[in-house]
Image: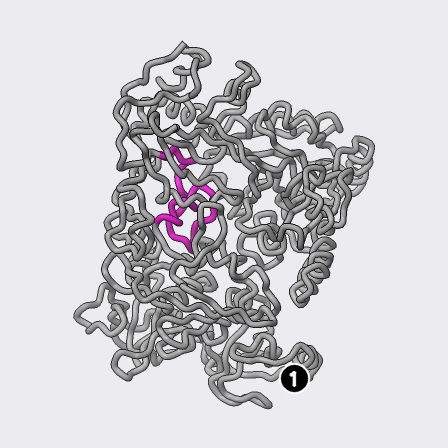
Amino acid sequence: MTCPALSSTAGTVSVYTLLAFAVAACGVPEGEYFGHIPDDIDPHQLRWCNQGEPDHLDPVRASSTVSAPMILMLFDGLTTYNPDGLPVASLATSWDISDDLRTYTFHLRRDARWSNGRGVTAYDVAYTAMRVANRLTASPNADNIQTVKNVMAYLTRTVAQLRRDAGPYRAGEIVEVLWSPTEAPDLDARAATHTLALRDLGAPETAAYAQVPPGIQVSVVERTGQRATPPSPDGQPWAYVYWQRDAEGVYGWVHADELTVEPNADMQLLVRRVTAKNRPGGAGSIAELAADELAPRPPVYVRGRDLTASTDVLGVSVPDPYTIVFECADPTPYLLALTANRALRTTPIEAVSRWPSRWTQPDRIITSGPMHLTEWKDRDHLTFVRSKTYWNPSEVKLDRIIAISMDDQAATTNYYFTGGCDATATNTIPSTYLPALNGELRGTTYKDYSVAPYLAVYFAQINTKVVTNRHLRRALGFAIDRRPVPRFMHGGEMPTAVLTPGTPIKSLGDADLAACGVTRDTPGLAMVMQSGELCYVPPPGLDYDLAKAKQELELARQELGTLPELTYLYNSGNEAHKQIAEYLQSSWKAVGLDVRIESMEWNSMLDATRTGKFQLLRFGAAGQLADTEGEFLPTFRCASPDNRSKWCNPQFESLMEEARTMRDRKARNAKVREAESVLLEDAPVLPIYVYTQKHLIKPYVRDYPVNLVDQPPLWRAWIDPDWEHHR
């Protein structure tokens, strides 16, 4: 039978409770398509059901797949994703990569504009990179640029620049500060004896948007005329400062000579020079750099007044307004691919400065991408319209995109079914619906349902600061038989005990089998990095072994005495997460572990991961390039701001550091494989399966971009009201 569509408008989530019964009441639809095809198709807009409410639209602060597609629409990057999910030129029209894979030089177009009419320059890109690296921003995305010289040290305030000669070191030299990052004070804390007028660079004091009272401390973030900052507009040095006036704070420019008070001037510190490979602007052969690693670096004592946490310590420079250079300490073959990532999507200094946490609200946002935000109704929908200032208007096919914020799979699918949205984001379909959609029940797959590969892995995350016992974590891993998962998921998922996602080895072509160094009967998955040339085969993980699970649990009991009570969290509204949670609970009970399961709203669960208020929870990782070193392992580094498991292993760190120095990709992969093995054996994370992408897309939606990395350039899709005549 065919059901009539319920009357609805985009974003009308108040009808969800009615829609939840639509499919059940109407039964399995007849015909070619699962979803209702409206009689009146608007060719100017796409109504898109997202996975939920975005955590942020600020590229530097966002950390979820829910936010990513919208950030791509709003903010341009040096490169962007094409329909296949590969990086292509965008703000940068060309680039040069040094032979040693350490220096990347990008040449920017001159016709890019912000939505306020200001030109986009290399200073905007540099400003965004420095926001990612600055501790004040608390960005979870520093992993994306961690190979750029001194980014992680800058983030932890363990690198600075000498303002005066000290022992064998000269003024201007970059030095390590030898202290614990947890104790690191702000070397650029300053204050003034009079009121500071925070304003845009070059603006008069009368244009100030915030006034800092005399004696109140601010932090200097950058100064004019440095390697990656704009020149002074009046010949006098300017400083860009942050004032923590409230929970949000405010940034602004002031004349640097106003900042006469240095609270940490007399603090005594021990420093030594950084090695040559970490010195911005430095170069040298591999042999010279290796020799310098062994050369003496005597530590010397200095005072706080002798140092500055200048942005000149970073491997980012702007030779001119349309050129930006990134210098990496070690060969980084994947940096180009990362420039399409949200971490380097440009952000506008004039908006961020005034409202650091709220600048993406529709009445304040300034954008550089193909679409512009005009409406954000909390937990309902966001409306994007065609940008009037985007440099490439011909690629924007839609006047309007409405992103509907639905985190309940059944509601999303029923809303699509009744005609409420034209396409759904990845994996917003309940697993119980899949047998009807994929043909298991009716023998024919609906034409508006699609399944595609996905570079993503689903896992149980363990807070190692709470679940400290290694044997207990390993017992949890060995207890999981992952083989039944596809049978109740119905979406072609691939069971896995390894973190790195990939393709089943048995399905690879001959050239890729040769590149992977395996035969077709080799079990497991492989990540094809360059077809026929480069491949990564992950090490085995803690696959199902009931005897080992019980053995590890007994060892944990001997060490702990009493086993702790454990709770596993999963985000609500997703049927599959609940099924997996219940399955894990029963698996763990089979070895004698009683684990509670509890659901939580998505953004609340994200907060729990950031604050460490969990023991076990459902999580996952989606890659944006086929490189486990660049995508899937960095978040387990000790200093990673996105290290949700709080795991820190010296052996893992050492192996990752060794890999960083290697130019030979195969040797590098071998070292990374050792590191992943250490990770899996210590079990801060328990992989469950490799995702597939499941979508519902109306037949009149053309060029809808489904790609391996799930980075859809939605603005390139278009609506064909005459679709029936163009079949």
In the rendered view, does 570 fall on the left or right side of 510?
left
Report the front residue among 580 and 704: 704
- Magenta-colored span: 48-73
Instruction: State whether residue 693 is above or below residue 302.
Output: above
Q: Position of residue 128 (x, y in %)?
A: 40, 62
What residue would you read off at disc 1? 298
- What residue do we see at 36% from left, 44% from top? 716
Q: Position of residue 189 (x, y in %)?
A: 41, 72
Q: Is residue 352 magenta?
A: no
- What residue do we see at 79% from left, 38% from top? 552
- What residue do we see at 25% from left, 81% from top? 234
Q: Position of residue 596 (x, y in %)?
A: 61, 29
The quarter of the image holding the C terminus is top left
Report the front residue among 293 and 31: 31
Kindly state the secondary structure of the residue where label 1 is placed: loop
Q: How many marks?
A: 1
Q: Position of residue 102 (x, y in %)?
A: 57, 70
**Residue 682 is at least partly visible in this image:** no
Mark 1 residue type: Pro
- What residue do we see at 35% from left, 72% from top? 321
Give residue 36's quadrant in the image: top left
Q: Is residue 71 magenta?
A: yes
The quarter of the image holding the N terminus is top left
